[in-house]
Image (cartoon, rainbow, N blue to C red):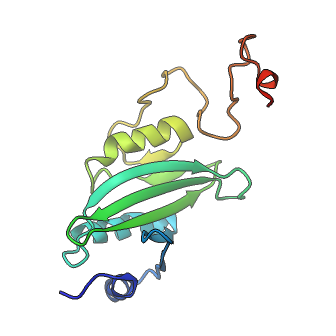
Amino acid sequence: MEPINLATIQQHIDAHLSIGIQISQDAFGVYTCELDIKQLYQFVHFLYKDEVLAINFLTDICGVHYPDQTAKEIGVVYHLQSMKHQLRLRVKVFVSESKPEVPSLTGIYGSANWMERETYDFYGVQFLGHPNLKRILNMDEMVAFPMRKEFPLEDPNREDKIDYQFGR
């Protein structure tokens, strides 16, 4: 079997999917691609089922908040891995803060269940089709999403922890 490298991955994906995905490699050897939200489920499903690439392990899902990026304020980053080839692929999608909706990957990876709930809990991303999307760590009564940049660093009702006391 020929070694899996960036060119091999790109050629294989181009030969099987006609959605124009460009993959790059960072300084640490992790392959990365950014997708349109409409391509996410099809692309990840292909990676999971494909026997050549064998990218069938979901390592993590995390959210990122970029309040200055208009219409792309919320990022969802998927870390996928091939145990067979010892390679990692980072898949990024971006959505607007006003409509943070991403298709759930629980139909592909059962392990996505709690990771999607955590990302919802901290960033407010609605995972469409998730079987039980509710808060996992924060109180159900909480109306804000604590990992977004507009969330206050300290509780404004506490006098012993006011931001200016810490130089903020």
Judge by depth and name the residue closer to the eye, 130 or 32: 32
Residue 93 visible from this viewpoint: yes
87 or 65: which is nearer to us?
87
Residue at left offset 23%, top offset 74%: 50
Image coords of residue 41 (percent x, y)? 37, 63
116 horizontally vs 100: left or right? left
User: As rendered, which of 63 and 97 lies closer to the eye?
Assistant: 63
Image quarter where the N terminus lies is bottom left
Image coordinates of residue 90 in percent, x first then y, are 43, 64
Residue name at image x 79 percent, y 21 percent? 165
Answer above or below: position of 143 versus 36: above
Residue 22 placed where, x, y %? 48, 80
- The structure residue drawn at horizontal position 71% and vertical position 58%, both measured from the top left corner, is 69
Residue 64 vertical placement versus 168 (above, below): below
Can the viewer see residue 104 in this picture? no
Name the quadrant containing residue 5: bottom left
Position of residue 125 in the picture relative to residue 54 (left or right): right
